[in-house]
Amino acid sequence: MSDDCLFCKMARGEIKPDTVYEDEKILAFRDINPQGPVHVLVIPKEHIPTLNDLEEHHAELLGRMFLVAKKIAEQENFAETGYRTVINCNRHGGQEVFHIHLHVIGGRQMTWPPG
């Protein structure tokens, strides 16, 4: 983990987010600037700055993040109606916190293109 990373501080318990899911490898919490009725961020507890920093051994962890997204969609009652998952990479991709995170957004009709 990184000492100065906001999401690492959350994963360590130094900052308490509005947690919706946690296990030994994953933390999921409500976004403080939601883009829909439900907007949850799913993060690995391991510090991985961007998608470009992924390695082969991260494949299982990334898959687990998406399984948690599915679980959240079911828990929040929009799995059947639909939802959006997004991972932004680097500044031009819209990434603001440099700790890989999966956005799970639901509870309304999504439009395309998103922005």
Image (cartoon, rainbow, N blue to C red):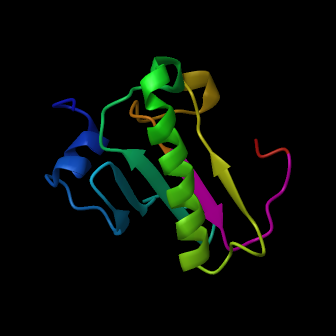
Residue shown at 70%/56% (left/top)? 84
**Residue 62: x %, y % from top left:** 50, 40
The relative height of residue 84 versus residue 94 in the rendered view (above or below) is below
Question: Can residue 113 be seen by looking at this rendering?
Answer: yes
The relative height of residue 38 versus residue 100 in the rendered view (above or below) is below
Residue shown at 21%/29% (left/top)? 2
- The span picked out in magenta is 102-112
**Residue 51: x %, y % from top left:** 53, 26
Q: Is residue 46 left or right of residue 43?
A: left
Residue shown at 57%/27% (left/top)? 89
**Residue 58: x %, y % from top left:** 44, 30
Which residue is the extreme one toward the right? 112
Which quadrant is home to the C terminus?
top right
Picture quadrant where residue 44 is located: top left
Q: Is residue 1 left or right of residue 106?
A: left
83 or 16: nearer the viewer = 83
Which quadrant is home to the N terminus?
top left
41 or 35: nearer the viewer = 41
Q: Is residue 99 left or right of residue 33?
A: left
Question: Can residue 38 be seen by looking at this rendering?
Answer: no
Residue shown at 60%/63% (left/top)? 70
Picture quadrant where residue 6 is located: top left
Is 97 colored magenta in this rendering? Answer: no
Which residue is the extreme one toward the bottom? 77
**Residue 104: x %, y % from top left:** 58, 57
